[in-house]
Amino acid sequence: MTLRIETERLVLRPMLMSDVDDLYEYQSNPEIVRYIPWPARTMTQVKEAAQNTIDTTKSDLVEINDHIVLVWELKNSGKVIGQSNMGLISKEHKTSNIGWVTHQDFQSKGYAFEATKSLLAYAFTNFDLHRVIADIDTRVQISANLAEKLGMRREGTFVEGEFFKGEWCDMWLYSILKREFSV
């Protein structure tokens, strides 16, 4: 089964090697990846990462470390403008994490909200999940705002909770339960 989610303006679908030119536009931007767990990538690195993503992405979340990565394709042009990821972090506690990244030219236009809300709806309907969390660097207020708009609550701040790209950073933990999520 190929995971495909359609929204008003987007198609969320598995990554393809034909997406690498679009992926490179934001994955090579140091400001976009500043708080993402990979460095600004060369085209070769984007191709390698895309192939790895294609090879390892699942269509569902069943076992620990199963993960899905979906690109956001604009319906009107076919351009990829971002991506979402989810990974099962506890089978026993039915918990997944979620994350997102948006192309610099398409930020603050509602695409991340549209994509993430539709992915949450799909995940809570189709996967055996009780809770979805987002770990957000405290320097990225725009992501915290998105989590709150999605109905997620800030459950805590981890002071110097992560050593990231050569420095200690504070992290917020956001969460939403299946029973709290509304479409």
Image (spheres, grey):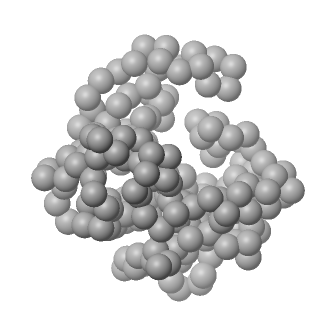
Q: Position of residue 127 (x, y in %)?
A: 31, 61
Identify the image quadrant of residue 128.
bottom left
Identify the image quadrant of residue 37.
top right
Tell me the residue at 67%/26% (across/down): 165
Q: Nearer the viewer, residue 51 or 135?
A: 51
Tell me the residue at 76%/68% (across/down): 21
Tell me the residue at 35%/21% (across/down): 157
Q: Position of residue 33 (x, y in %)?
A: 65, 43
Vertical relation: 144 (above or below) 105: above
Q: Residue furthest left?
A: 179
Task: Note whether residue 97 is visible.
Answer: no
Vertical relation: 19 (above or below) 182: below
Q: Position of residue 153 (x, y in %)?
A: 23, 38
Q: Is residue 27 left or right of residue 90?
A: right
Q: Is residue 10 left or right of residue 36?
A: left
Task: Note whether residue 71 is visible.
Answer: yes
Vertical relation: 90 (above or below) 9: above
Q: Residue furthest bottom?
A: 76
Image quadrant where one finds the C terminus: bottom left
Q: Position of residue 48 (x, y in %)?
A: 79, 57
Identify the image quadrant of residue 120.
bottom left
Q: Nearer the viewer, residue 80 or 13?
A: 13
Q: Nearer the viewer, residue 94 or 26?
A: 94
Q: Is residue 102 left or right of residue 22?
A: left
The count of marks equals: 0
Tell me the residue at 55%/56% (across/down): 102
